[in-house]
Structures are given as structure tokens and as C-alpha cells.
Amino acid sequence: MEQTVFLNGEYIERSDAKVDIEDRGYQFGDGIYEVIRVYEGTVFTMSEHLERLYKSAEKMKLTVPYEMEELTSMVGRLIEVNKVEDGFIYMQVSRGISPRQHHFPGKDVPASVIAYTKEFKRPVKQMSEGVTATLVEDIRWLRCDIKSLNLLGNILAKEEAASKGDFEAIQHRGETVTEGSSSNVFIVKDGTVYTHPVTNLILNGITRRVIKDLADENGVPFVERTFTVEELFEADEIFIASTTSEVMPVIKVDDTVVGQGVPGPVTMALQSWFTDRIKAACKKEV
């Protein structure tokens, strides 16, 4: 059975979904996106993702042509018709279709909205064993707080990591660690979790917010401040977090083994609490 996708108000088969060559998302990366996780047929933290979508749109003066309730309904319908159990929804909004020019088109040009689903299992083995990472210079633009389609810097960083057989690239601006190519980065030192504060230099990840909440609930010190490359290499534990990676231990960065070379106790506790949060969300929706 072919997948059903959403394209500008219509639910159509994926093979019939076509994007105009003058769509500004295609030509300029002039758009935004979200990836929303689905567990056991239940959407996880959907309101937080959609709220961030609208905030990203506001920051780049882009009007999303649907209310949040309409997007929520659309997500639910796609999950139902595609029978998604464990996976995610990809949603993208571009500034629409207009003759190529660098400045914005007129207000009569509507934004383009697409969404589709994909099956994706939890990375249980990697979470239990840990992954490796590559340290790279952060060459991205200065508005990383907008979840835009402009991902070339992220892609180059991820490719450098992948070419070395590593799971993720950890980025730094000078001596300051910012975030991963597709994740937020955390270190643990003497039982305290540290992560870059919410500024224009990182994306305020939804999973990041859940982790902060879980740490506060369970009495784990959680500090939002910058930390250096030296502190990264001297950390007791390192983990990254994203919608698809959840709470992912990093056991080696370049040639440096982190801690004992296995997932640390704080990371493992956060994993367990995160799993409990998922189960509670799924039970709530039943």
C-alpha cells in the first residue's frame, strides 16, 4: 500500500506529490521544518513541536497558512491512514511558489506545506552501548535557533563524522561547544548536567526540554551555561539528544574515551526516565 502524504491541503499518494521547481524551499532553503516522534501510534510532544514551528515562522516572517488545530488534525490523519506505530512525522513549510527573486514574494503568494510519515524504531542498541562522535568547527550561520531548511553546515559536519564511522559531529565555535549536527550536546561532571544555554547559536531541542524537566523532577543538577572543548574532553559523561536519538550516550570523541568507555549512570538514569515519560504519554492517549 502506497503512503499517503499531505501537500497543500490535500491527502494524496506519495507518487503523485510534486513540488514546483520555483518553490522557494527548493531554490533558497526559504522555509522551516519539524520532525515529530510517534510511539505506539501516539504522537509525542506534538504541541511543543508545533509551537516551535510557529515561532520559527515568526522569526523569519513566514505565515503558516493553517491553525495549530488544523495541523494537529492533519498529523493524526496521516498517522491513522499510514498505520504508523513507531516512527515520525516530517512537516515542512516554505515561503511558496513565485518567480525567482531574492526578496520575499507578495503577500498573495501562499506558503507551501508538506508532511509525510516514516517508520522508525527506537535506537535501543545504540542507546545501551553508546556511540562515537567527531569534533568539528561550527561553520553555520548565526540563527541556529530557527529550524530552517538551511542545513548545509549541518550536513557537512555530519558527513565528516560519517566518513570516520562516527554517529554524530559535535560542533564548537572557537573553544565553546555549541551542539551536534542534528542534536543538542550535554556533559556530566561530578553528577551535574551542563548544556549550552538557549541562544541564537543552538536550537532549543524539544528532547532537550524534556531532559531538563526530567532532571529537575529527579533532583539532578542541570546547568545551562557554555562549556569548552577542554571541559568536553574532561567530562565524566557525554550524551546527545534529539527527537530520533532520544538520550544517546557518547563513549568516545575523536580518539578520547569518555569516562569508562560505557554509558554513565546519569545518562542511563535520564534514559530510563525518558522511557517512562514515553510510556505515560502513550497510556494517556489510550
Image (cartoon, rainbow, N blue to C red):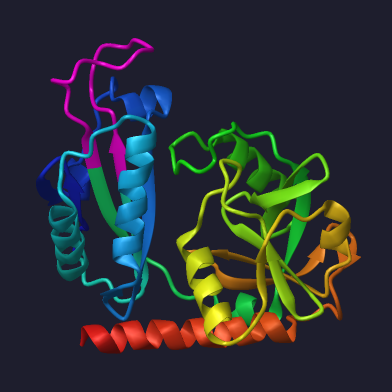
Q: Report whether 5 appears left or right of 266.
A: left
Residue 121 is inside the magenta segment: no
Would residue 244 be seen by someone viewing this image from the given angle?
no
- The x and y percentages for residue 255 are 89, 60
Q: Quadrant of the C terminus?
A: bottom left
* Residue at horizontal 57 percent and vertical 46 percent from the top: 199
Q: Report whether 104 appears left or right of 194.
A: left
Q: Note whether 276 is above or below 244 in the view shown.
A: below
* Residue at horizontal 30 percent and vertical 76 percent from the top: 85
* Residue at horizontal 15 percent and vertical 40 percent from the top: 8
- The x and y percentages for residue 230 are 89, 56
Q: Note whether 177 is above or below 126 in the view shown.
A: above
Would residue 242 be seen by someone viewing this image from the given angle?
yes
Residue 111 is inside the magenta segment: yes
Residue 190 or residue 122, whichever sits in front: 190
The residue range painted magenta reads: 92-113
What secondary structure prevails in the magenta region? loop
- The x and y percentages for residue 18 are 22, 35
* Residue at horizontal 40 percent and vertical 82 percent from the top: 278
Q: Quadrant of the N terminus?
A: bottom left
Residue 180 or residue 79, whichever sits in front: 180
